Image (cartoon, rainbow, N blue to C red):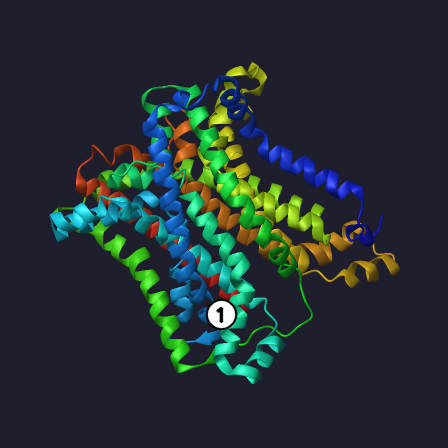
Amino acid sequence: MGPAVLERPGRWRAAGLGVLLVLAALPLVPPAAEALGSFEGAGSLGGARFLDSLKASALEGLAVSLLALAVGLPGGVLAALYDFPVRRALLAFSALPLLVPSLLAAIGWSRLASSLGPSASLALSSHAGTVLVFAGSAVPLVILASWAACALASGSALDAARLGGGERAAFLRAAGHAAPPALLAAVLGGLLALGDPGPGQILGPRGAGSEILTSFAATRDAALAARQSAVLAALALALALPAALLAAPRLAEGLLAREVRGAEIRSSRPAGRAGLAILSAVVLFGSVLPAAGLLLPLRRGVELGRAAATVARTLGDTVVVGAGGGAGAVILGFAAAFLAGRERGLRAILVTASAVVLALPSSLGALGILQAGTRAPAWADPIVRGRPALCLALGAHLFPVAAVLGLRAWGSLSQSWALAGELHGVPLPRYLLRVVLPRILPAAFAALLLTALLAASDVSAALLLAPPGASTLPLALFTVMANAPEALVATLCALHLSLAAAALLGAALLVRSRAA
């Protein structure tokens, strides 16, 4: 077998991709089967309270998606096409809310509202407060998706639009090019809010995620939690599938490398001012104000000793869970991207499936692994119990992130390289080592870093699968925030935020050094 086998189509690609997608969906099977077996109508879902919470969560998700699309699409396009002061720094730090649990932002906004008076606290304790918190992470997701889409746009097409209608026409053309992935990112941002219990637990309005968490953690009714999770998953599927099917062909096609001149950064005073205003507002409301609220209790004292002891106790588990979940996601995602190859249909299927899987709450897969562990034989304990089970659940949940980056990395390889290697008799292992690996490795490292940070920040899955005595830093913060002194919670939040900012800064410096 020569290098050309990497470019050949065949049924083995579709079969292999199907097997990988089934493996990623396996944790969802036990709760789905239990939910179907015990479902006896709306009364078996916990009464009208859960249905009201589900409706409220759906409306919150819709509001988050609309707000993210309205702000994130123009912000990402302006950041990709025009230069303005501190553009790179604003673009980088706008992504900070994606790397920390949403409960940190909720705690920060809650503390800030309390310091402003009862009226501010009352306004924030409504559904508007949870929308504000969820939008803090959904808007950067749309900004990054729009920015990446415009980075792949044709510079020649943009120049032609400028000749025909000026900068306004170029902006509209770029926005139209970025609209499908931005829409998909906005829908995902809204759907991720459906199963997240953190902000509702802190600010007051209880959503579907809070009800599921109560069913499992408080009442210990796993069957009820499974039925509620299945209904939430069905709602997520119904909302994510149309957007994924609409955006997948354009997104998958845009992930392939093209022999065109990319979009150039230009100077435009009106566009620069607009971009600066949008990204500054995103950083202000997504990072600066919540961080200020987190630091307010530190004026009355700093519990650095106890907080440092908690960080030291949980740091090992946090690193293990993040690295394990990220590694599992990268292995699944890059294998799926390789199997999809350059076949348009398989790429569209992978992007669609990735959007649907990522939209489902991580607690659903964790609940499935937990149920499977109770029925598994003793020899399977090292896999379905403890930290490995948590890493498997997070890897299966986050593999779509790695799959999208893997598709882009595979598209950066020229098809003619493999054909030339085949013609000259280059062995496949040497071609993989000398040509493929250097091109794939940076994308794999970026995917590993991103998925590891997301896995380490997850609370829902860790709450269900973390073994006794083990805890990640976000889980420890979630479990003590209601009873611990304000100074200790604030110090823990500040340390968590500092670690995330340091990781983001290190990643940005690494990417910049590689680009240089």
Q: Could you tell me which residue is drawn at 72 percent across and 57 percent down?
A: 434
Direction from residue 32 to residue 316 in the image, left or right:
left
Rendering quarter of residue 333: top right
Q: Could you tell me which residue is drawn at 45 percent across and 46 percent down?
A: 453
Direction from residue 321 to residue 430 in the image, left or right:
right
Which SS class for mark 1? helix
Any part of residue 323 in sight: no
Residue that mark 1 sits on: 80
Q: Could you tell me which residue is drawn at 40 percent across and 55 percent down?
A: 66
* Residue 51 horizontal/vertical position (percent): 37, 31
In depth, the one of 346 and 448 nearer the eye is 346
Please, is residue 393 above or below residue 499 in the view? Answer: above
Any part of residue 377 in sight: yes
Instruction: State the count of labels.
Output: 1
Please, is residue 513 above or below residue 3 in the view? Answer: below
Query: For the residue marked with disc 1, what is the amino acid?
Result: Ala
Residues packed near mark 1 inside 10 Å, few (<14), some (14 to 19) or many (20 plus): many
In depth, the one of 429 and 207 nearer the eye is 207
* Residue 439 horizontal/vertical position (percent): 65, 58
Split into 4 quadrants, where in the image is the C terminus?
A: bottom right
Direction from residue 376 to residue 301 in the image, left or right:
left
